[in-house]
Amino acid sequence: MKKILVFFLVIISLFYILSEFIGDRIIKGALETNISNVLDRETNIKDLKINYRNGDAEIYGLQIKNKNFNGNLLTLKKAYLKLNTSSIFSNNVEIESVVLDGIKLNYYF
């Protein structure tokens, strides 16, 4: 019985570590790729932190490049998103609220 309990604690610990440290990097790469494909512009995210228990996500240093001109179309210092916790592990993540900080938008005609 003691071995089974230790086994489950190890599995739960590994899942938590993988989701906290490796999962954020995987999701960051997928998010950059998806935004780049949808907008047809190069996109970079400096850091992404997701709190799975609270349903919070923070994006730091989002940059979307201009298509035909030098510089960035959009620079975002920080974005805070409150997610629906029941939708985090589904294909469609529901966002309840968004707070944006440090927006710079440059558009050339």
Image (spheres, helix red, strand yellow):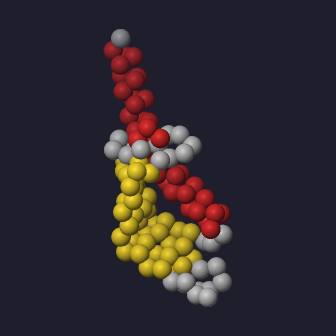
Q: Is residue 105 above or below residue 48?
A: below
- For image coordinates 40% across by 51% down, the residue present is 96
The image shows residue 46 at horizontal and vertical percentages of: 45, 67
Quarter of the image with the C terminus in it: bottom right
User: Is 5 left or right of 104, judged from the image as shown?
Assistant: left
Tell me how many marks there are. 0
User: Is 20 left or right of 73, judged from the image as shown?
Assistant: left
- Quadrant housing residue 5: top left
The image shows residue 59 at horizontal and vertical percentages of: 42, 62
Identity of the residue furthest to the top in this view: 1
- Quadrant housing residue 15: top left
User: Is 98 left or right of 35, judged from the image as shown?
Assistant: left
The image shows residue 34 at horizontal and vertical percentages of: 61, 59
The image shows residue 28 at horizontal and vertical percentages of: 51, 57
Quarter of the image with the N terminus in it: top left
Q: Is residue 36 above or below residue 94?
A: below
Residue 58 in sight here = no
Q: Is residue 7 above or below residue 43?
A: above
- For image coordinates 62% across by 68% down, the residue present is 39
- Quadrant housing residue 91: top right
Residue 48 in sight here = yes
- For image coordinates 36% across by 63% down, the residue present is 99
- For image coordinates 43% across by 38% down, the residue present is 86
